[in-house]
Image (cartoon, rainbow, N blue to C red):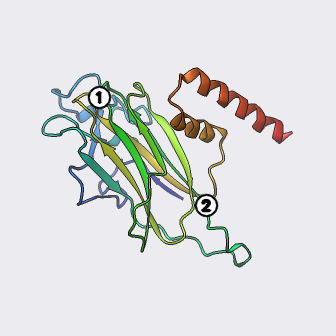
Amino acid sequence: EFHCSFEEEPICMFTQDKNDDFDWTRHSAATRDTKYTPNTGPSVDRTGSKQGFYMYIETSRPRKEGDQARLVSPFFDVAPKNPYSISNPPAYCFGFFYHMYGKHIGTLNAFLKQKGQTSSEGPVWSLIGNQGDHWRQAKVSIHPTSSFQVVLEGIRGPGIEGDIAIDDVTLEEGECRDPPTICTLSKIASTKSSSHIWLLCVTLVMTFLEGQR
Ligand SMILES: [Ca+2]
């Protein structure tokens, strides 16, 4: 199991992609510049600590709309295949907390990057726009067939109130199991009002609980 809360430098062997436009910044609210842009970015890390660190994209000048910053995890080895289930690549639950607060928030994408694969597939997770001043968890099941990295990509939105932050990146063996995961996924798929999403979540949790009896 892998867990990175970005409290230490180096940051769990994460690296900055060299083929993007700018870098993610390691930061804590306590050390934040007093001239920081208001109304965007977190005021505490995911644990609620002003001293706690997170990674974020600073979207003030000279950044411009569409600029990309990618943070790349270390390589993870895929567990040896069970000979009786060759058709099933092993599953991992990739999780992280995101903070996307500000009227100019752009896009946060998560990618699975497999060794020996050059063609880039679409993101395994993606979210666009202001999500309010909260840390929220994203979880997604991935099924790599060779050693792999996970990549978090922040894309700058249309203005300076667009700082996106991440914290507590985790990787566990097995599919993501919590019912809220399904809610997270449906939230991405839906751009409708949040009441619809809430209803769906309640239904799913009920279904889940029914199944436990
Ligand atoms: Ca942290």
Q: Secondary structure at mark 2?
A: loop
Residue nearer the viewer, 16 or 120:
120
Residue flagged by tag 2: what amino acid is it? Ala
In this rendering, the answer to whether 176 lies above or below 187 is below
Instruction: For ligand 1, tell me if the residue under mark 2 lies within 8 Å.
Output: no
Residue nearer the viewer, 172 or 71:
71
* Residue on which the image places disc 1: 104
Q: Is residue 52 visible?
A: no
Residue flagged by tag 1: what amino acid is it? His
- Place of residue 138 in the rendered image (x, y in percent of width and height, measured from the top left): 51, 42
- Place of residue 207 in the rendered image (x, y in percent of width and height, measured from the top left): 77, 35
- For the C terminus, which image quadrant? top right
Q: Is residue 199 left or right of residue 2?
A: right
- For the N terminus, which image quadrant? bottom right
The residue positioned 56% from the left and 40% from the top of the image is 185
Residue nearer the viewer, 179 or 14:
179
Q: Quadrant of residue 54?
A: top left
Q: Is residue 200 left or right of residue 8?
A: right
Please tell me the numbered disc located at residue 129. Answer: none
* Residue on which the image places disc 2: 91
The residue positioned 51% from the left and 72% from the top of the image is 146
